[in-house]
Amino acid sequence: MLVSVVVPCYNEEAVIRLYYEEMNKVTELLTDYDFELIFVNDGSKDGTLGILKEFASKDNRVKFISFSRNFGKESAMYAGLKNSNGDYVVLMDADLQDPPKTLIEMLRIATEEGYDSVATRRMTRKGEPPIRSFFARQFYKIMNKISKTDIVDGARDYRLMSRNFVDSLLRMSEYSRFSKGLFGWVGFKTKWIDYENVERAAGETKWSFWKLLLYSIEGIVAFSTLPLSISVFFGIIFAFLSFIGLVFVVIRAAIFGDPVAGWPSMISIILLIGGVQLICIGILGIYLSKVYLEVKKRPIFICSDSNIKDIKPVSYTHLRAHETVL
Ligand code: UDP
Ligand code: MG
């Protein structure tokens, strides 16, 4: 049985050798399985690609896909999954935060207990800045309230998937990919393994707070349309309030006459409503921009170098055409 290991790498020269060693220890133990190690170099600016080529020259299980620039982890995962051949595919970070030895247990669960997917989640956020943990928790709370798709707090992308699961994921060829949501969306029987957060073995995190914030907006927009309904809700509330206000003003003018007063309160109300309108237009704009990105059908990644001969997909449009044939 073939197992594909997909590893997205972005500026990981400090840790990639260490990872490869650890992974080799694990594959040596799993003698019942064949492995292919697919490293996706996501436009690294350091020596990562050189090291990957060195692995590939010595070890024919190693495949690499190198991007023409940094496309982001989501694109890297997509490229790896798309070009995997395994009966099982596992997604793993290069920084050893996803301990390779857990794979032994994951494979056992998938094959013996018949799960389509074995996912990992960390129970603690040890070693993370408290402010980041706080926002992350809030994000998952809100997300699960406003979206029908189950998005698990603390879930990592470290996940073993059956061929069927991977093919289902790949059928979703959307450009704005939010894997944490896509995993839940496709369904299937998933077993969760809990473990303590492990800190990065070397190198540093590629996610700034700002990048994480943008990523969370991506997640909300991809998996919920509730913000759009909120604008409608605001609209109705304000229309209702202004109607009551109108009735009040008319009656008061009829009884007490109409001395000119209340200019400051009027300005405040105009500013408030103006603000709310801008927020609503903004929300609409965010969704519209996502639609804009999707209809352009740009490729999810561009490969500039690889030791895989017929690298897939050629382009995003090609993928869509194929999908309709299906
Ligand atoms: N990564 C990537 N492209 C990016 C950012 C990250 O391929 O633009 C990879 C990175 O090399 C690592 C994994 O995604 O293997 C997780 O990144 P990182 O460890 O920086 O994130 P964290 O664990 O801090 O959330
Ligand atoms: Mg990490």
Image: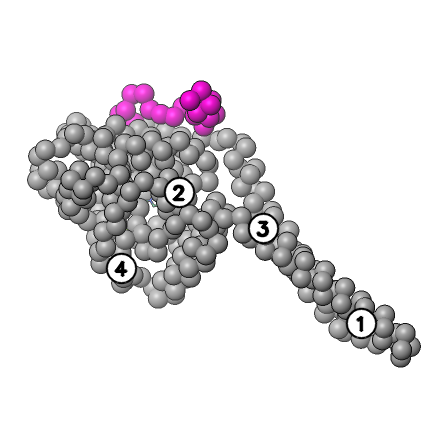
In the rendered image, the quadrant that contains the C terminus is: top left
Secondary structure beneath dot 1 equals helix
Q: Is mark 2 within 8 Å of ligand 1?
A: no
The image position of residue 95, as x and y in percent, is 24, 48
Residue 192 seen in the figure: yes
Query: Whole-Å distance between the Cαs marked 3 and 1?
Result: 31 Å
Q: Amino acid at mark 2?
A: Trp
* Residue 235 vertical position relative to residue 52 in the rendered view, above or below: below
273 and 57: which one is in front? Answer: 273
Residue 246 as seen in the image, left or right of residue 70: right
The amino acid type, in three-letter code, at marker 3 is Leu
Q: The residue under label 1 is which amino acid type?
A: Phe
Image marks 3 and 1: residues in contact by CB distance under 8 Å? no
State the image quarter where residue 48 is shown: top left
> What are the residue bounds of the magenta stretch?
306-326
Query: Who's the residue at 54% across and 52% down the image?
Result: 226
Q: Quadrant of residue 11?
A: top left
Which residue is under mark 4?
Answer: 123
Q: Nearer the N terminus, badge 1 or badge 4? A: 4
Position of 279 compared to 114: left or right?
right
Q: Which residue is mark 1?
A: 248
- CA–CA distance in space, label 1 to label 4: 55 Å
- How many residues crowd mark 4 within 10 Å: few (<14), some (14–19), many (20+)? some
First in sequence: mark 3 or mark 1? Answer: 3
- Earlier in the chain: of badge 1 and badge 2, it is 2
Q: What is the spatial separation of the Cα atoms under label 3 and label 2, in whole angstroms?
A: 21 Å
Tell me the tag on residue 185: 2
The label nearer to you, 3 versus 2, is 2
Q: Give the image location of residue 244, x and y in percent.
A: 76, 67
Position of 286 relative to 165 (above/below): below
Callout 1–callout 4 Cβ contact below 8 Å: no
**Distance from the alpha carbon under mark 3 to that under mark 4:** 33 Å
